Amino acid sequence: MTLFYEYSYYFTQCGFVTTSIANTLFIYLTILHIKKITGPYKVMVLVFSFVGIFFATWELVSRPFAHNYNKALMYFSLNSWLEESPEFLRIAICIYAALYIVILAIIAVQFLFRYFTLCRPNFSRKFGGAGVMVWMFYVLLSGAIYGGAMYVYCDPDEFSDSYMRDIISDTYELNITNVPRYVIVPYSEDGSIRWRIIKFLLSGVATIALQYLIIIYCGVRMHTVLQKELAQQSVVNRKLQKQFFRALVVQTIVPTLLFVLPIAPFLIGPLIQPFFLFEMNFQTGWMYVILCLYPPIDTIAFMLIVSEYKKATLEMFKPVLPKTIKVTSEISTSTAAAVTR
């Protein structure tokens, strides 16, 4: 009998296929056909696309899932073809969690770059050359802090395993000792605080909050600048800058709506459950299934918003398109300088 949660893998596979197709097309167009995106920003969007493919691929390998039960959250792997390598799978789901922070950090870096491009063009050039190594280090460090904290502080112990053992056996027909896992239980049996879990939660919240702080600050400032400065620029340049701004906003909103907001109550739940005494018993791993839709949605949205991608895509598929569809360009070559700054 196939348990209900097993169907999640079909969604993961669909996410992998759509991500591979969409991001490969995006990378091909960016490298060979897109002329207006160059310099550091081109590196950023390419890195973002490659990370998206790796993210979807790694989800197939690690098969992350989660379960909320009252004051506990268990994050574990459902991979059944690497059962003899439990430590590898523990590291694999840890890397998967870190990859989400990496994606968020890349978006924050893009916001920072677009902000400096509009407000301090000379400084924006520092994101190229050796500067690539600097922002790449920041991106990887953000993921390493989150993943490292999980690996160090959320290691299961006798109390956490005993708390989750029956529910995991009843729901998934699994022996918890054989499952690669991390268990987040903020309170001991006597109600005292388990500080190592609190350290993980605080480090995770701080890392995510930093990315959103950068995104919100730069987003607000960019919106203000766009309203004032672009009124003095050409129509095509104004349109291009607005397209990049909308693309960044979509890149932020989609994961926020697909994952951050839906999962937040379940992450907070173990902390507040003892005070409100409500019952929780949810297969929250379905949130990760939803998250696998993010890379293709993000890529497709970017290609729809930035008109040069639409033009290049239509040109590519022109031989098989109806003759009634005309390929036009909304962006002139005069805008190239605005993108490369």
Image (tube, rainbow, N blue to C red):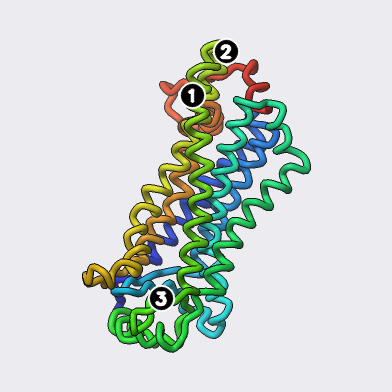
Q: Earlier in the sequence, mark 1 or mark 2?
A: 1
Q: Residues within 10 Å of mark 3 (few under 14, many from 20)?
A: some
Quadrant of the rendered image containing residue 4: bottom left
The nearer-to-camera label among 1 and 2 is 1
Q: Name the residue: 37% across, 63% down.
A: 267
- Three-letter code for the amino acid on which mark 2 is drawn: Gln
CA distance for labels 3 and 2 = 58 Å
Please say if 332 is above or below 15. Answer: above
Q: Quadrant of the N terminus?
A: bottom left
Marker disc for residue 233: 2
Q: Earlier in the sequence, mark 3 or mark 2?
A: 3
- Per the image, the residue denoted by label 3 is 193
Q: Residues within 10 Å of mark 2 (few under 14, many from 20)?
A: few
Marker disc for residue 198: none
Q: Name the residue: 34% across, 69% down.
A: 270
- Three-letter code for the amino acid on which mark 1 is drawn: Thr
Residue at disc 3, secondary structure: loop
The nearer-to-camera label among 3 and 2 is 3
In the displayed structure image, the side of residue 128 where residue 139 appears, left or right: left
In the displayed structure image, the side of residue 32 where residue 97 appears, left or right: left
Residue at disc 1, secondary structure: helix
Quadrant of the rendered image containing residue 297: top left
Give coordinates of residue 52: x percent, y percent: 54, 52
Q: Residues within 10 Å of mark 1 (few under 14, many from 20)?
A: few
- Three-letter code for the amino acid on which mark 3 is drawn: Ile
Give coordinates of residue 26: x percent, y percent: 56, 41
Please say if 244 is above or below 53. Answer: above
Marker disc for residue 224: 1
